[in-house]
Image (cartoon, helix red, strand yellow):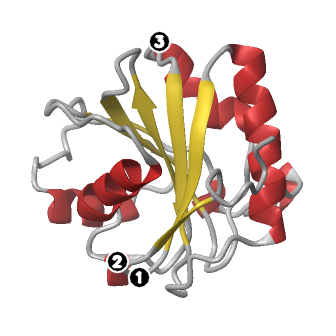
Amino acid sequence: MSRSRKDSQSAFQMPLRLEWGTSPVASGHEAVDRAILSQLAGERYVRQVKEEVLVRSPADAANHLLQHVFQPFDTFEQEELWTLLLNTRNRITHEVMVYRGTVNAVQVRPAEIFKEAVRNNAVLMVVAHCHPSGDPTPSPDDVQATRILVQAGKNLDIELLDHVVIGRGRWVSMKERGLGFG
């Protein structure tokens, strides 16, 4: 992920604003909805999670992301940045697609990343983005962005639990590796 000037962002780097379940185009089928959403650059995608998903570890978050968000992985041609919003009991309440970037970068603006967390009164958040190359190794830009997000979370009293980088069937917890946290 890289920070870049606003005037250099592409249409695919704009924040997304489609409220899940309120759009006439949301079909309820994830594959169809993903295809529709891929055409709606500039629209935010927010999905309320109705099942009880408890996040006790980075593996819990990564497994949820691999099974419900970044699936099927081969359809991701650009980086996407998502957040998982959690309540005080570490249960996921919402999945939010915040940005869609380029093949190897996505712009980071903390206000946009935390917007839905504030709106939904989340106290915890996991940030995740995919590397379409399939290699989940965090870049120096990923580490810098994580530092910025950790500080923003402290300022907002919303704890950033982790930043997970997703690759093809693999993932990296930046918190476990001490990258950007601390």
Mark 2, other Cα within 10 Å: few <14 / some 14–19 / many ≥20: some
Looking at the image, which is closer to me, 61 or 37? 61
Say which element carries label 1. Answer: loop
Q: Which of the image's four quarters has the C terminus?
A: top right
Q: Residue at x 83, y 68 (%)?
A: 140
Three-letter code for the amino acid on which mark 3 is drawn: Asn
Q: Is residue 99 visible?
A: no
Identified by mark 2, the residue type is: Phe
Q: Nearer the viewer, mark 2 or mark 1?
A: 1
Using residue 103 as the reference point, say whether residue 17 is left or right of it: left
Separation of residues labelled 2 and 1 (CA atoms): 6 Å
Residue at (68, 62) in percent of width and height = 106
Alpha carbon separation for disc pair 3 and 1: 32 Å
Residue contact at pointers 2 and 1, CB within 8 angstroms: yes
Q: CA distance from mark 2 to mark 3?
A: 30 Å
Residue drawn at the location 47% of the way across and 12% of the way down: 121
Q: Which residue is mark 2?
A: 73
Dot label at residue 121 = 3
- Inspect the image, locate mark 1, and give the three-letter code of the amino acid beneath it: Arg
> Is disc 2 placed on a helix, strand or loop?
helix
User: How many numbered discs?
Assistant: 3
Quadrant containing the N terminus is bottom right
Residue 55, position in %: x, y?
35, 38
The residue at which mark 1 appears reads as: 168
Q: Within 10 angstroms of label 3, few (less than 14), some, or many (20 or more) residues?
A: some
- Up-down: is 45 above or below 48? below
Location of residue 110 with respect to 35 vertically, above or below: above
**Picture coordinates of residue 103, whole percent (x, y):** 61, 80
The part of the image, by quadrant, that contains residue 179 is bottom right
Q: Secondary structure at mark 3?
A: loop
